[in-house]
Amino acid sequence: MRKYLAVMLIAGIVSCTNTEKKVAGNSDTTTSDAATAAPAEVELKEPKVQAIYNGYIILKDALVSTKFEEAKKAADALKADLASYKGCENTALIAEKIATAADIAAQRKDFTSLSSDVIALFKHADITKGAIFVQHCPMANNGDGGDWLSSEQKIQNPYYGDEMMECGRVVETIKTAL
């Protein structure tokens, strides 16, 4: 537990951040019938942050589908968006590692660090429509766990793809401030 907290603290310090926090709370739920509906569209106030979110979701979906080449292309595009956003230069380096990884396993391993950084970014972003779900797989990374973002509550695990597609749970919902 201490290791996990230390990693989260370090990730929070060096991650992409803005100024205001917009977190709706911590909901520890599992996949339900309502979660199987079509994914909700997420809109963010700042266009650069929207581009980062869209690129992240494309990368996550490629990992969910176990599409190595698509993940490389998505990570490369995400790297450019992150590099152009002040404060996300180090996160862009993680995206570059994913783009140049030798295999899908290496991509998934680096996806953990990338996700930690962008989760911190989106917790501080201005969401104008929809909600972003922070999801967690306790089995990822040899039992150390791993988080990721999704536009829907339905679990689609990027760490294992079709091996354990629904392994995980929603741990937090980030949405518009009321």
Image (cartoon, rainbow, N blue to C red):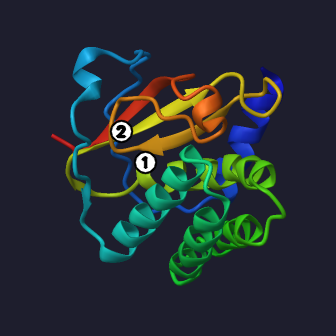
Q: Residues within 10 Å of mark 2 (few under 14, many from 20)?
A: some
Quarter of the view holding residue 142: top right
Amino acid at pointer 1: Lys
Q: Quadrant of the N terminus?
A: top right
- Would residue 20 appear left or right of 59 to someone viewing this image? left
Q: Nearer the viewer, residue 125 or 52?
A: 52
Q: Are marks 2 and 1 in contact (CB under 8 Å)?
A: yes
Q: Residues within 10 Å of mark 1 (few under 14, many from 20)?
A: many
Quarter of the view holding residue 103: bottom right
Determine whether the residue tagged by mark 1 lies in a helix, strand or loop: helix
Q: How many numbered marks have been drawn onto this rendered protein structure?
A: 2
Residue 93 spot, x, y in % from top left = 73, 72
Q: Nearer the viewer, residue 18 or 144?
A: 144
Residue 36 spot, x, y in % from top left = 28, 27
Amino acid at pointer 2: Val
N-term mark: 2 or 1: 2
Q: Which residue, given by chain and number where applicable, does mark 1 sit on? A: 123
Q: CA distance from mark 2 to mark 1?
A: 6 Å
- Would residue 112 appear left or right of 131 to someone viewing this image? right
Q: Which mark is residue 23?
A: 2
Residue 38 spot, x, y in % from top left = 22, 39
Determine whether the residue tagged by mark 2 lies in a helix, strand or loop: loop
Residue 70 spot, x, y in % from top left = 58, 66
Q: Which mark is residue 112?
A: none
Name above or below for residue 105 compared with residue 171.
below
- Would residue 19 appear left or right of 72 to someone viewing this image? left
Q: Quadrant of the C terminus?
A: top left
